[in-house]
Image (cartoon, rainbow, N blue to C red):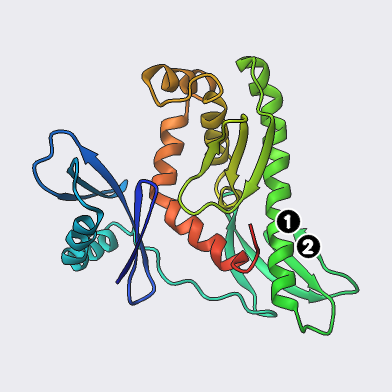
């Protein structure tokens, strides 16, 4: 089992190819390391000043128990079939399962049908896989920008503030961010989620235009803008690792 520390998460890749994401948090009253598993996912808490190596060693020691508990709650991300040119496969799009199919054509394009998405790739297929990944990345970003543009038209007048730019790209651990120049970044994996999950992340980052922290008044602002935020936040906690793994399978070779 290997581990990778990033942000507030510890990512564990098992020998079987599964991925475990553990939320890590220092706790002011913690006297020892503690690992908990709930339907929202896994969490490790520890006293302030604990060395990251101690946290990693603690998780390695409890790895079998952690994997078993998460598997019982169906929170383990199972290995996904790799993307193969010409081989149909299912994947989530806007919260619905669609069939990804392939076809030959004069030029590369994406054709959307009822429950299907067809990648049209010209022959010869010497670079078909990177072309297909690029097509998918562009298509997913276009779908996200279409939704976001529509929602911004409603949210910006309510807030009285607007972001200076919007960037959509794969993000390792976050769903979104707001930088010091008021530019919003959104994770491309949100194109796979139900629209309301994307809507929550957008509302979350927009509210940071008014409150840069996660103080109570920030959450009050989120509540006013998007009352269903708790349900969508919980959905992302339950399904986030799976979504990010699906996106990586689809566009792994596409640069940020």
Q: How many marks?
A: 2
Rendered residue at 65%/62% (across/down): 255
Residue closer to the observer: 184 or 102: 184
SS class, disc 2: strand
Q: Earlier in the sequence, mark 1 or mark 2?
A: 2
Q: Which residue is mark 2?
A: 110
On the rendered structure, is 175 left or right of 30? Answer: right
| Percent of width and height locating residue 109 | 82, 64
Task: Tell me, yes or no, whether the two marked residues, 1 and 2, touch with CB atoms within 8 Å.
Answer: yes
Q: Which residue is mark 1?
A: 138
Residue closer to the observer: 115 or 250: 250
Residue closer to the observer: 249 or 165: 165
On the rendered structure, is 166 left or right of 241? Answer: right
Q: Quadrant of the C terminus?
A: bottom right
Label 1 or label 2, whichever lies nearer to me, is 1
| Percent of width and height locating residue 3 | 33, 64
SS class, disc 1: helix
- Neighbourhood count class around disc 1 (C-alpha, 10 Å): few under 14, some 14–19, many 20 upward: some
**On the image, which quarter does residue 11 sit in?**
bottom left
Q: Is residue 18 depicted above or below 33 in this figure?
A: below
């Amino acid at each position: 089992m290997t581990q990778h520390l990033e942000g507030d998460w510890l990512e564990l890749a098992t020998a079987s190819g599964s991925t475990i994401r553990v939320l890590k948090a220092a706790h002011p009253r913690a006297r020892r390391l503690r690992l908990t598993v709930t339907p929202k996912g896994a969490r490790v808490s520890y006293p302030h000043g604990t060395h990251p190596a101690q946290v990693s060693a603690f998780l390695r020691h409890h790895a079998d128990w952690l994997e078993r508990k998460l598997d019982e709650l169906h929170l383990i991300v199972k290995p996904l079939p790799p993307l193969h040119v010409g081989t149909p496969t299912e994947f989530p799009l806007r919260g619905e399962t669609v069939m990804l199919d392939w076809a030959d054509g004069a030029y590369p394009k994406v054709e959307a049908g009822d429950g299907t998405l067809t990648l049209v790739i010209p022959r010869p297929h010497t670079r078909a896989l990177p072309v297909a990944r690029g097509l998918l990345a562009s298509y997913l970003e276009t779908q996200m920008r279409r939704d976001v543009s529509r929602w911004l038209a409603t949210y910006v007048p309510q807030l009285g503030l607007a972001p200076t730019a919007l960037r959509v790209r794969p993000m390792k651990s976050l769903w979104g961010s707001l930088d010091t120049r008021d530019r919003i970044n959104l994770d491309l994996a949100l194109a796979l989620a139900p629209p309301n999950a994307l809507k929550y992340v957008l509302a979350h980052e927009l509210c940071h235009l008014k409150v840069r922290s996660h103080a109570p008044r920030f959450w009050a602002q989120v509540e006013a803008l998007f009352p269903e935020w708790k349900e969508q936040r919980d959905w992302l906690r339950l399904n986030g690792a799976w979504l990010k793994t699906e996106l990586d399978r689809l566009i792994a070779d596409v640069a940020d």
